[in-house]
Image (cartoon, helix red, strand yellow):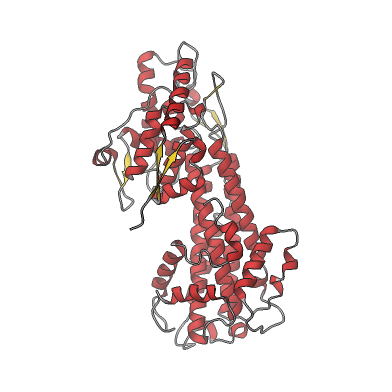
Amino acid sequence: MTAIAVHAIRRAEDLGPALIDGLARGTCRVTLAPELLAGLAVSRAETLADLAGDQPVYGVNTGMGALADVRLDAAARDRHQNTLMAGRAVGSAPWLRRTQARAMLAVRLRTLLHPAAGASPELCRFLADLLDADVVPAVPAGGSGAAGEIIPLAHLGAAVLGSGQVLDARGEAVDAGPALAAAGLGPRSFAAKEGVAFLEGVPGLTGCAVLAGRDARLLVAQVVVVFSAAQALVHASRDPLHPALGHGDDELLAVLAASRELRGDGPVRALQAPVSFRVTAPALAVVMRAVDGLDAAVRRALTGVTDSPAHVDGRFIGTAGFAGTDLTAAAGALTTALVHLGEVGTARLHRLLDDRITGLPRQLSDAPGLHAGMAAVHKRAVGVAHRLRRFAVPALVGAMETSTGQEDVQSFGFEAAECLTVAVDGLRDILACELLAVHQAGVLGGPPAGVAEAVTTALGQVAGILPAGAGDRPFGRDLDKIIELLTAGWARNAPSALAPWSSHAR
């Protein structure tokens, strides 16, 4: 059993994307160092001092939204930070995946470490305890509406209070109270300003973006491996991999170098490589730039002021931290790039089924006419690509009025996160279909000639989990196994020329 690393967080900046990813996937733990807790105690005391008096502070001694002009008496203020959660937890299943909800919780912890939030050391320590005990709040994956992430965050907050729900090991929602007790934790109330701080910002989108960015880096490396094997199988010209074609484009240069490395010196059959093979490297370069753009937006989201009202220079000021504009735009760009890469993958797969291109039996069937071979596998890939096109839409626009005419003009971050997640999953599905066809081609005609040893090793791992032979069978089971292999990190390090990029920020 692999020991789980424990990281001491001494500064808020220590809880960066790599640790958030590890916390989400359960591969690491964090503790909050005494010096960090001491700093939080100072910012909390300053926040409480500036809350004293009769100055109106949005969401603390007033209502929220269209009810911001309603002042609360002392008794109402004492209840308000908890009751903020109850009426806003209006979401339902489907829930975020456990990894996504854990990522959201980790980002919420990170942003509450910012002094502008004014959160107490006790609340931050409780969130770390939830992660450590693997108590995962049930957060609705969709239907968030406007007002930032208030609805999903209210579900997160309700779990903290013990009145909400958490996810069991199967991903089903159960009552939070018994789960907290079983973990040795009790419900925790939100103190002054902590409730409104908990509902602000975009930790859900940020957490999902962290996970998707790292998944996309892995997929880029895996696509290069499968693409290189397919090049060798169809004996494609190496002309589109010439380094001169990447002049002025660092990402394209890296893809071309990795593809040349893995493609090797096998034979060439035709003067021109199929179009889908010629455009793959540029499509990969676009994805790489989009991933870098998303990661940069994540870093800005983690370090910026997302609270509203934020406690800055002794004042409480309203902000646009709930909007998520930057992250939503970056997520949309990556979604579109991944969808395009998936479409290119279906075209390459189509060429693998063409006996005029490969010299192998039609449709990669061991008995053409009697057996379908990879025909239905290609249809699955095309169906996935068609579905993905519906998600390559901008979630950045959305102006509406809600809550008795309250203005809501913002991005729709949870929709952006959903589209990005679907694109990542869809590209992995399409890649699994192509990888199965590459395996089938190797069974029918022998392994691809001249490829690098890393490709041979990677394809051997695929062969090791699949049934012998090339005859028709329920290929969906094969694809399930391949998808599991891809998700686990298959061939992550095979394209050494991409290693600096694919391991970035991990």
| Residue 307, percent from left and from top | 51, 30
- As drawn, 356 above or below 119: below
Q: Quadrant of residue 159?
A: top left
Q: How many marks?
A: 0
| Quadrant position of residue 137 | top left
Camera-side residue: 335 or 444? Answer: 444
- Locate residue 162 relative to residue 469 in the image: left or right: left
Residue 65: image x %, image y %?
A: 49, 26
Q: Is residue 135 visible?
A: no
Q: Position of residue 118 (x, y in %)?
A: 47, 25
Q: Quadrant of the N terminus?
A: bottom left
Does residue 217 lie above or below 155 as drawn? Answer: below
Quadrant of the rendered structure where residue 281 is? bottom right
Which is nearer the eye, 116 or 286?
116
Give the residue drawn at x 39%, y 41%.
91
Q: Where in the figure is residue 479, as x and y percent of width and height?
A: 43, 70
Whether residue 472 is visible here, answered yes or no, is yes
Left-right relation of 248 to 169: right
- Image point (39%, 25%), residue name: 81
* Residue 21 versus residue 465 in the image, above or below: above
Q: Residue at x 46, y 29 (%)?
A: 197
- Is residue 200 found left or right of 73 in the rendered image? right
**Residue shown at 49%/35% (left/top)?**
11
